[in-house]
Amino acid sequence: MTPDLWRGRRVFLTGHTGFKGAWLTHWLKRAGATVTGFALNPPTKPNLYEEATIGAGIESVIADIRDLAAVERAMTAANPEVVLHLAAQPIVRASYDDPVGTYSTNVMGTVHLLDAVRRCPAVRVVVVVTSDKCYENREWLWPYRENEPMGGKDPYSNSKACAELVTAAYRSSFFQSGNAPRVATARAGNIVGGGDWAQDRLVPDLIRAFSSGSPAQIRNPAAIRPWQFVLDALNGYLVLAEALWSGTAEAGAWNFGPNEGDAHSVEWIADRLLGAWGNDAAWTRDSEAHVPEAVTLKLDSTRSRALLGWRPRVPLETAVDWLVEFYGGLLGGSSAAALMDQQIERFEGSQ
């Protein structure tokens, strides 16, 4: 992120009440952007949006991305120059419980967002955030590149593949003229960071168990994921938006995954976090039957490294330490916003 490029920039950010959205809103506010957030109420109690008073200093619209009229009203009022679309149903297991809601949010929500953009002439850049799980996962050992086929065997993953196809269709159909917005998609890995309290995500589940003094239950210890620190992924979205603004990036799909060495197993993450947390923390394998999930998934980010100059800055070992610092700080009475500021400043200083 180049803070000077965001000062005074009008940004329409969907999903600002979620974990990643809260971090991104806070970072943009620090850079001096004028942010309009559009999202449902925070999905958990507690949540980072409220803990860090993210809504202060922005225009926050609490509404449903599935409501086209609401999206259009909010975008017209904001008249943004940059649109960052993070609103989603983000949990794989939840997509089995509510596939219709997952598709409605992740697919039609993207349609609504892009259709509203068509009627907002101020917009110059759109970044639609999808997922590493949008690929047709063949359980390969090598990482997936941007030109691999879309797929997804569960409703969440498949809905993100559909969002990619929707974005590509809108780009080809409506955003080809010289003055049209430049529209791209961003695919990051499994995001970890302080302030995530979602259900059925590994790190929040571990933190809840460790904080309560009970053993955490792990579903798939051997599953390998492209883990990465939240600011690394968000920095990818912002670097892409900056390059689209300047015309140096192609309007297409971009991967922002971790270093290949950070594609670790669930067991590795659990053990590393357990060791850093201390205080007799423990985990056990959950023996109950669960919905199927991919075993191996990696991202190839060669293109974004070579053409955007982006790279991950926080190794996974360090990210785990920052996680413990954040949650431990909260338990010790520190301000969530102050903890975010500390880690953003440290991240920005790591260039």
Image (spheres, helix red, strand yellow):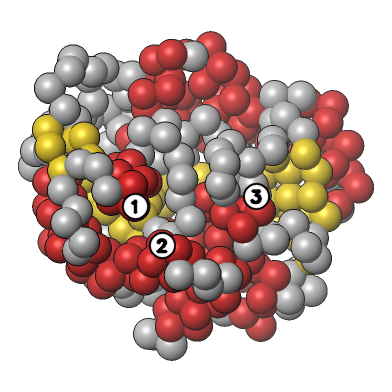
Q: CA distance from mark 2 to mark 1?
A: 9 Å
Which residue is denoted by mark 1 in the rendering? 211
Observer-nearest of 246 and 305: 305
Which residue is denoted by mark 2 in the rendering? 327
Q: Quadrant of the C terminus?
A: bottom left
Going by the image, does 257 lie left or right of 16? left
Observer-nearest of 100 and 136: 100
Q: Can see residue 302?
A: no
SS at badge 2: helix
Observer-nearest of 216 and 17: 216
Choose mark 2 or mark 3, whichever is in front: 2
What residue is drawn where x is 43% and y is 87%? 349
The picture quadrant where one finds residue 174 is: top right
Q: Are marks 2 and 1 in contact (CB under 8 Å)?
A: yes
What residue is drawn where x is 62% and y is 32%? 110
Q: In the rendering, which numbered label is found on residue 16?
A: 3
